[in-house]
Amino acid sequence: MKKMRNVLVVLMLMASIAPLAFADEAENSTDEIEIDTETQKQIEIMNTTLGAQIRLLQLEKTINKNIIKGEEVVSFLTELEYNTTELEAIIAELDLLKEEVISADPNVTDAVQIFVDLKYDAIYLTKDFRETLKGLLYNETIERIRERIKNMSCEQVQNITKNIQNKIKQFNRNQLYIIYPIIGENGEYFLNKYHNGTLSMEQIKNNISKTVSMMTKEKRYDIFYQLKQNKIKNKIRARICFENATENFLERQQNRLTYRIQKAENMSDDPISKEMQERIRNRLNGYADDSNSDNGNGSGTSSNGKDDSCNGNKQQSGGGES
Amino acid sequence: MKKMLLTIISILIVFFSSILIYHIFSEDSIEVNQTDERYDTTEDVMNEIDESLLDEDDELDIGEMV
């Protein structure tokens, strides 16, 4: 009788534990971040050096654009005799961040981690600038500034844009080198034309579409299956890199902020540099308080846990380069 | 009493098993249906190709300064 009751208790326990088995693991770690779906999608191409180069260049370009716009805002406010030290301190940190992006090596195995870290820093600083501005001005003035900087052409960004477009072209060419054999075609002729600029990507896609539409249903299914398979493989690789990037996020952020304080200390002794140092210190103290209140779990662990699977898949610019 | 407990356990096992089987079956059939609808169109192949390529004007979004 007692035995039966025990069996019943065990069964009930198992039933109550079952949902936990399906739940996402490591939800209780405080040293991780939730990476948005857009960033998750962006890192999918970073398993090749070329893909990593593209993402880092795009990040550099966006930060650059925001710095230029920020400087325009500061010059506008200086004309109106506002105190812009806080805003200038944020721009100065964005400048340091830009240097970090430029010096990031796309060949290294943790390029995804670096990209995610720096992108989130850029998002934070941009938001910080926006909110500081909101605290300084009325909505009408903000609207005036928005109009003023809306159509700003950033010549300094033009070169990076061209560089990015060339790299994307090269990336697409490499992808098509993989795709053409799947549809059973030798795409050399079209790819060369695409490379020369005599054929656009749209024209190439139209050509592929015509070829595929003339195939049998079974052949189309086969192509679809193979393309899907490649995509899933890439997604799995990206997932591993993405999980590595989420681990020990705060620890890495604290290291970066400490490094930035050191850099700022060496720069100059002006009020902007001091303001920047103070703002970074406040953030560092905020993180320290957070981790203390969360009992600090996770911060002492190493980030090496799953790195190998992420590193092992780093390829040199795809297989199709001629 | 013993018989009753045995019955309860059996009912519980049957109940959980049927939920599990139903769940697995319904997920599979959704997947099969989706694949059935998809694979025979050129458009779906082209969508897959599109997703593996990048737009030349592709940009990152980190938010606006103002």
Image (cartoon, rainbow, N blue to C red):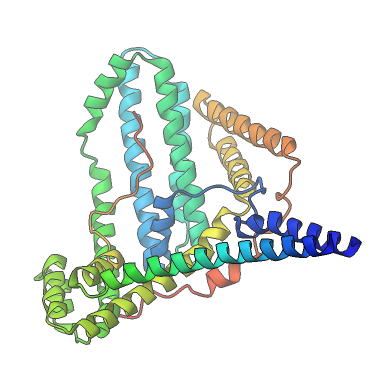
At 48% across and 29% down in the image, what residue appears? A89
Q: For this rendering, which residue is in front, A96 or A29? A: A29
Residue A317 seen = no
Locate the C terminus of chain A and report the quarter of the image it occupies: bottom left
User: How far from the left and from the top, in percent, is residue B54?
Assistant: 27, 62
Residue A10 occupies which quadrant of the picture?
bottom right
Task: Say left or right for A213 vs A272.
Answer: left
Query: Residue reaching furthest right?
Result: A2
Work out whether A265 lies above or below A239.
Answer: above
Task: Say left or right for A272 vs B13.
Answer: left
Q: For this rendering, which residue is in front, A242 or A157? A: A242
Q: For this rendering, which residue is in front, B6 or A233? A: B6
Task: Say left or right for A48 vs A240.
Answer: left
User: How far from the left and from the top, in percent, is residue A1?
Assistant: 89, 62
Residue A186 occupies which quadrant of the picture?
bottom left
At 12% across and 69% down in the image, what residue appears? A197
User: How far from the left and from the top, in percent, is residue A21?
Assistant: 65, 60
Work out whether A212 lies above or below B9.
Answer: below
Work out whether A88 lies above or below B16.
Answer: above
